[in-house]
Amino acid sequence: MRKIILNLALSLDGYIEGPNGEYDWCFTDQDYGMTEFLGNTDAIFLGRKSYEMLMSASPEVFSAIKMYVFSNTLKNVGDNAEIITEADFKTRIEEIRHQPGANIWLFGGAELVSAFLVNNMINELLISVHPVILGGGKPLFINIKERIDLTLISSEQFSSGLVQLKYTLKPKFDMSMLDNM
């Protein structure tokens, strides 16, 4: 089964974009492991706003990667993209996960990340914490009602002050498993 890996930038105070939707605080002075990450990835899950942002910024960069855009309103996407609606959310993700292929990059936005977390559909979180406090903006985690425990698998500090944290979700203990013992 393919891994779904959340990989994104985060301000020290927990925001994925600034108060006016800006991303100018994200470092681009180094590779930060993206070349290796993309070399092990052949698909990307993202929301409508993230898709539109990527397509307006640098569509050529993502032309070789299959894109799955989660939206109930978007009607048209590029040749290398597919729209997944809320009605098909779980079914389509499971189908894609079980297809042959490399890792799947979960890019965002916050609502989509939360939906994946709540449904326990993320294998790893690769969070690049940038040394900036934005003071406001869009938080990464929204609509999370229960605690989600994580296990740190690695961390890497860069000369810029950026720190990458890699986590897995701790498995939830299911009390019904005791009934089978």
Image (spheres, rainbow, N blue to C red):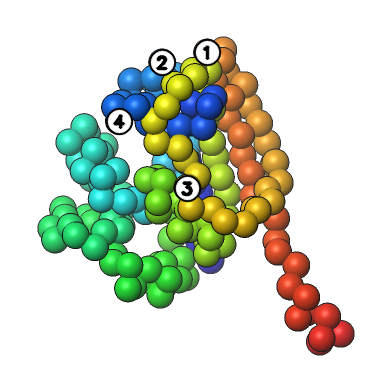
Q: How many marks?
A: 4
Q: Residues within 10 Å of mark 1 (few under 14, many from 20)?
A: few
Residue 13, can we see it? yes
Tell me the element at label 2.
Answer: loop
Q: Is residue 101 left or right of residue 147?
A: left
Residue 103 rendering spot, x and y as whole percentages: 47, 53
The residue singled out by tag 2 in the image is: 29
Q: Quadrant of residue 57?
A: top left
Q: Give, as a three-letter code, the residue at label 3.
A: Ile
Query: Closer to the observer: label 4 or label 2?
Result: 4
Q: CA distance from mark 2 to mark 3?
A: 30 Å
Asked if disc 2 and disc 1 are in contact, CB closer than 8 Å, the reply is: yes
Tell which of 13 and 156 is nearer to you.
13
Q: Is residue 54 left or right of residue 79?
A: right
Q: Give, as a three-letter code, the residue at label 4.
A: Gly
The tag earlier along the polypeptide, 2 or 3, is 2
The residue singled out by tag 3 in the image is: 142
The tag earlier along the polypeptide, 4 or 3, is 4
Q: Quadrant of the C terminus?
A: bottom right
Residue 77 rendering spot, x and y as whole percentages: 16, 55
The residue singled out by tag 1 in the image is: 160
